[in-house]
Amino acid sequence: MSKSPTTPKSDKPEAPKGDRLQKILAQAGIASRRKAEEIILEGRVIVNGQVVTELGTRADPAKDHIRVDGKLLHGPEPQRYFMVNKPRGYVTTTDDPEHRPTVLQLLGQDKQKQVVGEHQKLPRLYPVGRLDYLSEGLLLMTNDGDLANRLSKASTGVEKTYLVKVSGAPTPAAIDQLRRGIMIDRGRLDEVRSGRRDRILTQPAKIEQVRSGDNPWYEVTLTEGRNRQLRKMFEEIGHHVEKIRRIGYGALVLDVPPGAFRELSTGEVQALGRAAAGKKVERKKTLPEAAQLKKPVPPRKRRSPNQPARKRAS
C-alpha cells in the first residue's frame, strides 16, 4: 500500500497574532500610541502575569489578561468623533510645555471632568492634524487612531478648505503661481540642513478670492497639510498671512461657533472613511454661518467740528 505524500513544512515562521501592545493601550484610552510606548518601556505593562518591555510584543485583548499599573484592561473604548471650532490662542496638542491653553480644554478633558448634557464622559480624544496657535476653525478629535492616521496621509488627497486673509493684494500672476505649486521650506523656518534649506514643491491648490480690498480674503483648498504651509506659501509671494480659518475637511463643513464642539453623525463618519480611502465626497452647497466671512463693519462717520452734537433723549 503506497503512502500518501506528506506536505512539506514551511520554513517561514508563523506571523505573530494579535495587535501591538501600544495600539491596544491606545484603543483602551490609556494614552496615545507614542505615550503607550513609553509606558511599555517603563515596565508598567503585564501580559498574562509577565512584565513586557518589548515594543514589538503583540497580544489579543479578547484572550490575554493585560494590566497597566496593576489595572486590568476591559477592551477598547467605543470610537467617537467630534468636530471642534478651535479659536485663536489654543494649541493643537494634548499637552503644552509652555502651559498655553490646549484644545483638550475646550472639551473639558484637561481635568477629565464630566461633560454635562448628551456627551456624558468623553473618552481620551486626540486631534487629527493640526492648526497652529494663531489659526482657528474646524478640527477633528477622535480616539479612532486608524482613521486619524489615514486622514493625515497626504497620499489620500483629503481636501481641507481655509479662509485666508493676507496683508496687501497679491497679483493674479502670484496667485496662479500658488495654484500650480510653489517651493517652500519643508521644516521650520529656522531649520537649515547640510548648509542649505530643505525645500519642497507644494501640490496644486484651489484658490479663489472671496473678498477684495487692501487686505483681501481667499478661499484655499489643499490636499496636504505641511507645517505652517499656508503662511509659507503666501510669504513666498511676498504677502504676510493675517488670519486663517479652516472651514472644510473632507465632506465636513464647519457649523459650530468658536470654542464649541459636537459629535459627528454616523453618515459623517462614513464620509470621512470614504475620503480617507481616496474617494470623492461632496460637501454642503450652502455654507453654515460659522463657515462664512462676517460682513465688514462700515466705518463710523466722523462728526464735523462745526456740526452740533445730537441731543440725548431725556
Image (spheres, rainbow, N blue to C red):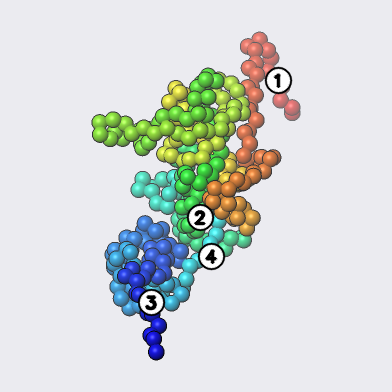
Q: Mark 3 points at which residue?
A: 7
Q: Residue at x 39, y 73 (%)?
A: 66
Question: What's the amino acid at mark 2?
Answer: Leu
Camera-near label (1 vs 3) is 3
In the rendered image, residue 161, in percent from the top left (x then y), is placed at: 56, 38
Which circle's residue, 4 or 2, is located before the other in the chain?
A: 4
Q: Which residue is drawn at 38% across and 85% down?
A: 3
In the rendered image, residue 257, in percent from the top left (x then y), is placed at: 60, 44
Crowd rating for badge 4 (residues with CA inside 10 Å; few <14, some 14–19, many 20+):
few
In the rendered image, residue 256, in percent from the top left (x then y), is placed at: 61, 46
Q: Residue 78 carries which label?
A: 4
Crowd rating for badge 2 (residues with CA inside 10 Å; few <14, some 14–19, many 20+):
some
The residue lying toward the viewer, choosing from 8 and 34, is 8
The answer to whether mark 3 and mark 2 are in CB contact below 8 A is no
Q: Name the residue under label 1.
A: 310
Element under disc 4: loop
Camera-near label (4 vs 3) is 3
Crowd rating for badge 3 (residues with CA inside 10 Å; few <14, some 14–19, many 20+):
few
Looking at the rendered structure, the number of numbered marks drawn on it comes to 4
Q: Distance between the residues labelled 1 and 3?
A: 103 Å
Q: How far apart are marks 4 and 2 (CA)?
A: 14 Å
Element under disc 2: helix
Element under disc 3: loop
The answer to whether mark 2 and mark 1 are in CB contact below 8 A is no
Question: What's the amino acid at mark 3?
Answer: Thr
Which circle's residue, 4 or 1, is located before the other in the chain?
A: 4
Which circle's residue, 2 or 1, is located before the other in the chain?
A: 2
The answer to whether mark 1 and mark 3 are in CB contact below 8 A is no
Question: What's the amino acid at mark 4?
Answer: Pro
